[in-house]
Amino acid sequence: MPTAAAVAAIPPVAQPQAAPPGASAMAKARPSIAPAAWCRRVFTSLSQQETSSAVTGHVGMLLTYYMEVEPAAADFDASLERFTHDQRPKIAEAAALLQSAWRRTAVAQPDEPA
């Protein structure tokens, strides 16, 4: 499991928000920040923390990878999902930690009329 320090080091960026009163059914959550920008923010935060765990280095490695690749939001979540099933336990753990934090940054938006 990730250490409390590793989890605390991931900034909330944007907390999920409820739909405005009277909004229709919620669409799937959409990120409020581009994945590469989010990764830079998290990486900077981790760099400023004095955290050291077996997972921290793997989190940093994944963040660096995604900063270089600059994936679209949907691709980012799907890629993190694949990494959560990686054969390397620390990579899978780091990806699960990042995916959880990324999903918390998504702001749900109401369905758009067709």
Image (spheres, helix red, strand yellow):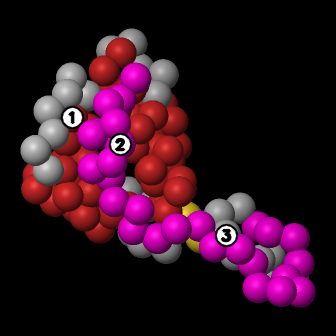
Q: Earlier in the sequence, mark 1 or mark 3?
A: 1
Q: Quadrant of residue 19?
A: bottom right
Q: Secondary structure at mark 3?
A: loop
Distance (Cα) linking label 2 and label 3 = 23 Å
Given residues 98 and 81, the one toward you in this image is 98
Name the residue tied to disc 1: 56
For the N terminus, which image quadrant? top left
Q: Quadrant of residue 7?
A: top left
User: Callout 1, which amino acid?
Assistant: Thr
One can see residue 24 in this view: yes
Q: Which residue: 10% across, 56% down?
A: 48
Q: Which residue: 89% across, 86% down?
A: 22
Q: Is residue 20 magenta?
A: yes
Q: Secondary structure at mark 1?
A: helix
Given residues 8 and 68, the one toward you in this image is 8
- In the rendered image, the vertical position of residue 77 relative to residue 6, given as above or below: below
User: Callout 3, which amino acid?
Assistant: Ala
Name the residue tied to disc 2: 7
User: Callout 2, which amino acid?
Assistant: Val
Q: Which residue: 28% across, 39% down?
A: 6
Name the residue tied to disc 3: 108
Q: Which residues are magenta?
A: 1-27
Query: In the picture provided, is 31 more to the left or to the right than 18?
Result: left
Q: Position of residue 97 (x, y in %)?
A: 41, 38
Query: In the picture provided, is 34 more to the left or to the right than 44?
Result: right
Q: Position of residue 77 (x, y in %)?
A: 50, 48
Nearest-to-viewer mark from 2 and 3:
2
